[in-house]
Amino acid sequence: MNYKIKINKRAQKFIAKQPLRERERIYAALNKLPEEGDIKAMRGRAEMYRLRVGDYRIIYTVDHNVLTVYVIDAGNRGDVYK
């Protein structure tokens, strides 16, 4: 199934600041969601997941009813969880 990907403005700004190669890696990983990738459910946050792309982390939720992935935040490994 193809899921639509909706990216929050804050995450878009972070991704746009990255070098071209890193942006391509991040978008390639996002296009594989929600089935593939280094994905883990986040503890303490219901129905939120994190995707690891190198040193970057993408925080997102999935709405299976409307086939949409909502990217909430993106950032460096230590900063995104704050």
Image (spheres, grey):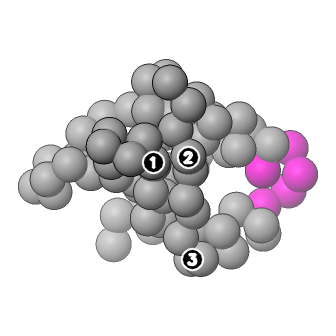
Q: Residue 10 at x, y = what percent?
A: 57, 77
Q: Amino acid at mark 3?
A: Arg
Q: Name the residue furthest right.
A: 20
Q: Which residue is mark 2?
A: 4
Q: Is residue 22 magenta?
A: yes
Query: How far apart are the alpha carbons under marks 3 and 2?
Result: 18 Å
Q: CA distance from mark 1 to mark 2?
A: 5 Å
- Does 57 appear in magenta? no
Amino acid type for the residue under numbered disc 1: Thr
Q: Visible in this render: residue 46?
A: yes
In the rendered structure, which segment of residues is drawn in magenta?
A: 18-23
Q: Measuring 40% from the left and 53% from the top, which residue is drawn there? A: 60
From where the camera sits, is residue 49 visible?
A: no
Q: Residue at x 48, y 58 (%)?
A: 71
Marks 2 and 1: in contact by CB < 8 Å?
yes
> Which residue was labeled with disc 1?
68
Give the vertical position of 82 relative to 66 (above or below). Answer: below
- Pick out the residue farthest to the front: 66
Relative height, residue 41 to residue 9 (above, below): above
Report the front residue among 10 and 53.
Answer: 10
Relative image position of residue 5 (x, y in whole percent): 56, 50
Task: Decide: is 66 above or below 25.
Answer: below
3 left or right of 60 in image:
right
Q: Residue at x 59, y 77 (%)?
A: 9
Query: Residue 38: which quarter of the image?
Result: top left
Q: Tell me the kind of residue under disc 2.
A: Lys
Q: CA distance from mark 3 to mark 1?
A: 18 Å
31 with respect to 8 (left or right):
right
Q: Residues within 10 Å of mark 2 (few under 14, many from 20)?
A: some
Picture residue at 71% right of the left edge, 35% below the top: 28
Name the residue beneath numbered marker 3: 10
**Mark earlier in primary sequence (3, 2):** 2
